Amino acid sequence: MIFSPRPRRVLAVTAVAAVAVTGPFAAAAAASTEDASRGNAAYTLTILHNNDGESKLLNAPGQPDFGGVARFATLVDKLRAQATSGRSARGEAHARGAILLSSGDNFLAGPEFTASLRKGVPYYDSLALKAIGYDAMAIGNHEFDFGPDVLADFIKGFGKKPPPFVSANLDMSAEPKLNALVKNGTIVASTTLREAGQRIGIVGATTPALPSISSPRNVKVLQNIAGLIQAEVDNLTRRGTDKVILISHLQGLSEDRALAPLLKNVDVMIAGGGDELLAADTTPLVPGDAISTDPQTGEKLRYPLYAKDKAGANVPIVTTAGDYKYVGRLVVNFDRHGKVLGVGSGSGPVRVSGVAPDAVTPDRHIQRTVVEPVGAFVNAMAANVIGQSAVALEGRRDPGVRTKETNLGNLLADALLATGKKNAAGFGVKPPDVALQNGGGIRNNSLIPPGPISELTTFQIAAFGNFVSVVPDVPRNQFKEILENAVSKMPAADGRFAQVAGFTFVYDPTGTAQVVDNAGTVLTPGTRVRSVTLSDGTVIVRDGAVVPGAGISVATNDFSARGGDQYPFRGLPFTTVGVTYQQALADFITTDLGRQITANAYPAAGSGRITTS
């Protein structure tokens, strides 16, 4: 990785042996969470943080009185002022500072980001986040969903003085627009902030799964996460920085908790990607939210968690639920040598509320320049009704489109198949026999009630800029491998689970789960797929064995065709047919279905396309 430094930023990366982020969770430590350490503190740092904002600029989904980036900005300003203005009520006389950090997924496909794409650079997300004033931002997986060039444009939208975007394990040298930002010191492996006379090191990391869950193109994702992070930490400490914070987007707390024992001299870890909510029972929450629980013990997750590092020190680990619903606040007391003495009792998530008793008013500038134009764009799409549904459409993730056949999944898969057939001749490709839609590409995460279906609804369902693509002549053995990949993570909800059209298949969830690498090479053959039958009666798989015969033409989206979600197409040639999957869905509803989605065609329980044995 080649990073070119600019003043105040530490940017060295050293090649080290790979260390896997695996293994059991570090045991939670009973470290001080009270202000008993305050008396010996030389410095108190309030770390304000969030993650997974994901372009929810208007309000929290389904909660118009909560969230919203303009309210979020006002709350950040309020918490900054509380952290740094004069003596506290308890009389601390030592230095105090405050910083604001993001742990990634700073934008996401959907109606709001579509407004940005239609507007052009600077995107609305860039304008809002610039106005809020982040000190550093991690790079998440969703930043690459539209490819590296859109990420570069997002960062350029911050203007002449963007915050540092940090990731220690991304090599961007083969992507010209991003590499230019590396060379000018905007994208860095680590950075040093100065706050209230103190040097604070920030190290970033991005999930190693990036190639299989997003579209980084020629960005190289280095896998030895722990070693690369430690190299940055060591460089910071050698240069006299005695306070180090890791902001990572590794897909959830479990990975950060497993990472902690492999590191040393990291004082605080701030996770992203999991949307977990850590809080006390008395913490005000957004209606409908609940404190997350430990998947192993079932116990509620408190803010902060603790894990033992490589040297046996207790490291606080925090995160917040996304969508601009909360500002995380971690108050950390340090001694004069930079050692963490404890975490202040004022720590925890602070909800972004527009109603009493904790209401904040929206920031006027962000409300006028971001929220109002984005809201007008979204409202216009909502007013454009393109059809009616007689049945509720299941788009929730779990249980739903990432674990089983659903009627919404069938609808979208049918749209891909119909579009592929209509457009194949015009693009000189064989018409598809079947269609596959990865569950991770269905984004609404809701049960759509019976009633009107608007243009906005289709953007909420099919939010990415993915294009309908046809992969002709997929060998039957390989088609079975693709289906094995689709069910390989069951019963866990996973974006690779496929919604299908043009065939039915039966799988045994107790069979051997296929294992593939990011190149689509099968490392462990799967035995879960038991039968596959095309809609015309052609048998492709019988009793787990592939029936010899001609290849199959597959309609899907270009993300999956390129190997996203580890779909093992393995570089088979494919042709995009000129339509995004959102456009395909809208056209299918208006034209093929005559604007009517019936319960007969799309029954609530599905139509038996995917069953278990």
Image (cartoon, rainbow, N blue to C red):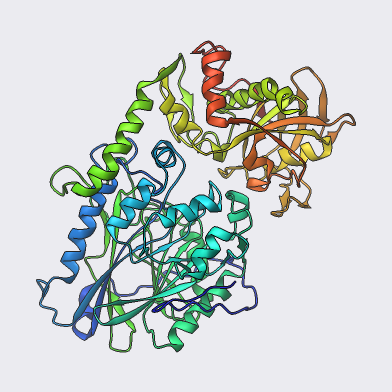
Residue at 51% of width from left, 33% of height from top? 462
Q: How many marks?
A: 0
Left or right, residue 478 beside residue 84: right
Q: Quadrant of residue 412?
A: top right
Residue at 57% of width from left, 42% of height from top? 495
Residue at 16% of width from left, 49% of height from top? 358
Regarding residue 8, the answer to whether it shows in the image is yes
571 relative to 101, above or below: above
Regarding residue 282, the answer to whether it shows in the image is no
Q: Quadrant of the N terminus?
A: bottom right
Q: Quadrant of the C terminus?
A: top right
Left or right, residue 260 beside residue 58: right
**x and y percent of residue 605 in the render?**
55, 22
Q: Quadrant of residue 245?
A: bottom left
113 relative to 432, above or below: below
Residue at 35% of width from left, 73% of height from top? 30
Left or right, residue 108 beside residue 69: right
574 relative to 520, above or below: above
Outermost residue to the right: 548
**x and y percent of residue 319 in the render?**
38, 59
332 relative to 41, above or below: above
**x and y percent of residue 521 in the render?**
77, 52
Q: Nearer the viewer, residue 42 or 554?
A: 554
**x and y percent of residue 340 in the render?**
33, 80
Q: Nearer the viewer, residue 136 or 533?
A: 136
Left or right, residue 169 beside residue 267: right
